[in-house]
Image: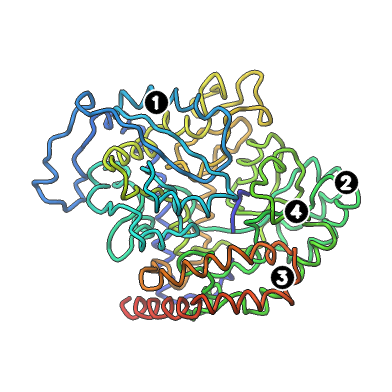
């Protein structure tokens, strides 16, 4: 996702109630920033396995006074963690360095399982259903969080999290914790990162200058383009170098979603959304004229060769992006995402947005980690996640690999690639900062803007809150229909979304099959729950 990711809204009046929401949102990032400061003082605190919950907790006196277990009395365990991402050649080398440290902290070792993006949506439900050796599982609103809770895959962390990850729990902003809560129970540990979102594109500065489109692209930094506005640029790239794909394209790509940015209700991959910052009526976005018009343009781009002709068979575009074989890279355009991604790919990037900062309930569920109900060591899994969120060594080893092998320090929190290593040949550079816990602990690569977190605060402050911000969809009543809809969409949607087939001939067929699978029932259930939630506010 630029590896960015997807959503937008206009700054309409939101009344007194919306103003109160915005005021509350303004302090979210300040609380998240506090985690980075708190982390510096928590390194030593995690040496023992179980600590007392924070004073703000209302746990019973009996539970809060349970004796901590010294690390040398804990039996050794191996924890399996599954996340979407590009598998890394040196993962075992990273694990070895990390596990030597973890043994002294919590007497545990971690096995990091990165599943390529193209296989993720199919693989993780199978892993959870089988119960095969899964301790920690990445999850998100866009990655079937609600469905996974409904199917009983995730452990209830309501009492466990304050006990086994007290520092993380105490410092997480309430809106993020609310995003991980279904029917009053906490089922995941959110990642501390940006909360608002915008969608857009990143591009290589070198290629933009080479193709003579740098000035055309620069104007998009202040004048938000429509999809049709990109055509002259894509045409120039195609004419000058046929080996470079102007837009790329993969099985998971949805260009239309980037420009419409509908407000999701539960998993954003399941149809049934709201018009952004409009009203609270759930609609089937695939039936809107906006979506059809965009799909027609994408199909036109496919026929012109701007989208990869083999898009529906491409599961992971990372190697093509890294090799500058894709010009416009779509995704989330958070502050300095271009610097973050560019430093990982090894070339200078710029970015522009096609949507305005918007804050939805799914943004509070954008990146989380859950403990599988089949895990034999849920307590130790949370103790590990406590370190991921509070210990700079653990966090940065996961993100950057082994010091003096994959990177070298240039200052307290500034690093560069190790001698002889760069973005093209490094054996460990997953570029998944937003997945690995507290992002405010991340080192900066040489050349990155170290004022990043101040920009994040301004970005969040500018975000327009969804009219259902704080609402979490409970998928339990329609879990059977959701499973059927997912199967239908996975089969037919990629060829439509990538422009491979004509939407005028195929979109109505997809909608018909989705309705037969139970989509109308899902939309009605979403509307019912939203109406109940609104009535209770």
On screen, residue 31 above or below 88: below
Apparent side of residue 301 relative to residue 29 in the rendered image (left or right)? right
Q: Earlier in the sequence, mark 4 or mark 1?
A: 1
Quarter occupied by the C terminus: bottom left
Q: Which residue is mark 1?
A: 99
Q: Which residue is mark 3?
A: 294
On screen, residue 89 above or below 178: above
Point out which mark residue 310 bears: 4
Residue at horizontal 77%, vertical 43%? 325
Q: Earlier in the sequence, mark 4 or mark 2?
A: 2
Q: Earlier in the sequence, mark 1 or mark 2?
A: 1
Q: Quadrant of residue 376?
A: top left
Circle 2: is it few (<14), some (14-19), or many (20+) Cα within 10 Å?
A: few
Q: Kindly report the distance in space between the C-alpha atoms of the residues bearing marks 4 and 3.
A: 20 Å
Percent across and percent down for residue 341 are 63, 41
Asked which secondary structure carries label 2, the reply is: loop
Percent across and percent down for residue 457 are 49, 51
Q: Kindly report the distance in space between the C-alpha atoms of the residues bearing marks 4 and 1.
A: 40 Å
Asked which secondary structure carries label 4, the reply is: loop
**One can see residue 97 in this view:** yes
Point out which mark residue 241 bears: 2
Q: Quadrant of residue 229?
A: bottom right
Q: Earlier in the sequence, mark 1 or mark 3?
A: 1
**One can see residue 31 in this view:** no
Q: Kindly report the distance in space between the C-alpha atoms of the residues bearing marks 1 and 3.
A: 48 Å
Q: Kindly report the distance in space between the C-alpha atoms of the residues bearing marks 4 and 2.
A: 18 Å
Q: Kindly report the distance in space between the C-alpha atoms of the residues bearing marks 2 and 3.
A: 26 Å
Residue at horizontal 37%, vertical 76%? 529
């Amino acid at each position: 996702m630029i590896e960015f990711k997807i959503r937008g809204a206009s700054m309409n009046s939101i009344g007194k109630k919306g103003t109160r929401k915005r005021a509350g949102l303004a302090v979210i990032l300040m609380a998240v920033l506090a985690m980075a400061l708190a982390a510096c003082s928590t390194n030593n605190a995690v040496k023992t396995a179980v600590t007392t919950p924070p004073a703000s907790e209302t746990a019973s006196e009996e539970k809060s006074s349970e004796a901590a277990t010294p690390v040398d009395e804990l039996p050794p365990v191996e924890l399996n963690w599954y996340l979407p991402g590009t598998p890394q050649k040196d993962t075992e080398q990273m694990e070895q360095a990390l596990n030597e440290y973890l043994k002294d902290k919590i007497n545990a070792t971690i096995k990091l399982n990165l599943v390529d993006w193209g296989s993720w949506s199919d693989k993780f439900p199978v892993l959870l259903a089988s119960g095969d050796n899964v301790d920690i599982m990445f999850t998100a609103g866009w990655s079937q969080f609600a469905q996974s809770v409904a199917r009983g895959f995730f452990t209830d962390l309501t009492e466990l999290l304050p006990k086994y990850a007290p520092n993380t729990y105490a410092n997480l902003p309430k809106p993020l914790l609310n995003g991980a809560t279904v029917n009053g129970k906490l089922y995941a540990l959110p990642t501390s990162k940006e909360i608002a979102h915008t969608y857009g594109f990143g591009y290589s500065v070198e290629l933009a200058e080479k193709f003579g489109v740098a000035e055309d692209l620069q104007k998009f930094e202040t004048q938000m383009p429509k999809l049709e506005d990109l055509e002259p640029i894509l045409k120039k790239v195609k004419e000058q170098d046929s080996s470079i794909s102007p837009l790329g394209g993969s099985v998971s790509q949805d260009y239309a979603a980037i420009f419409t940015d509908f407000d999701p209700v539960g998993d954003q991959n399941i149809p049934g959304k709201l018009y952004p910052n409009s009203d609270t009526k759930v609609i089937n976005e695939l039936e809107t004229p906006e979506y059809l018009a965009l799909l027609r343009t994408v199909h036109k781009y496919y026929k012109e060769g701007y989208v990869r002709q083999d898009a529906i068979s491409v599961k992971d575009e990372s190697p093509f992006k890294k090799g500058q074989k894709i010009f416009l890279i779509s995704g989330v355009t958070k502050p300095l995402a271009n610097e973050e991604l560019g430093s990982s790919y090894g070339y200078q990037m710029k970015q522009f947005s096609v949507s305005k900062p918007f804050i939805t309930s799914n943004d509070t569920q954008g990146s989380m980690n859950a403990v599988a109900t089949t895990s034999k060591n849920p307590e130790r899994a949370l103790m590990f996640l406590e370190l991921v969120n509070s210990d700079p060594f653990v966090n940065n080893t996961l993100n950057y690999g082994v010091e003096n092998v994959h990177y070298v320090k240039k200052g307290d929190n500034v690093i560069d690639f190790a001698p002889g290593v760069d973005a093209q040949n490094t054996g460990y550079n997953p570029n998944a900062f937003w997945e690995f816990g507290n992002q405010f602990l991340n080192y900066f690569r040489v050349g990155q803007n170290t004022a990043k977190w101040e920009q994040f605060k301004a970005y969040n402050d500018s975000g327009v809150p969804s009219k259902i911000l704080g609402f979490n969809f409970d998928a339990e009543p329609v879990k059977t229909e959701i499973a059927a809809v997912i199967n239908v969409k996975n089969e037919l949607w990629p060829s439509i979304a990538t422009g491979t087939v004509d939407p005028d001939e195929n979109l109505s067929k997809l909608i018909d099959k989705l309705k037969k699978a139970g989509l109308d029932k899902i939309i009605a259930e979403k509307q019912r729950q939203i109406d109940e939630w609104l009535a209770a506010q």
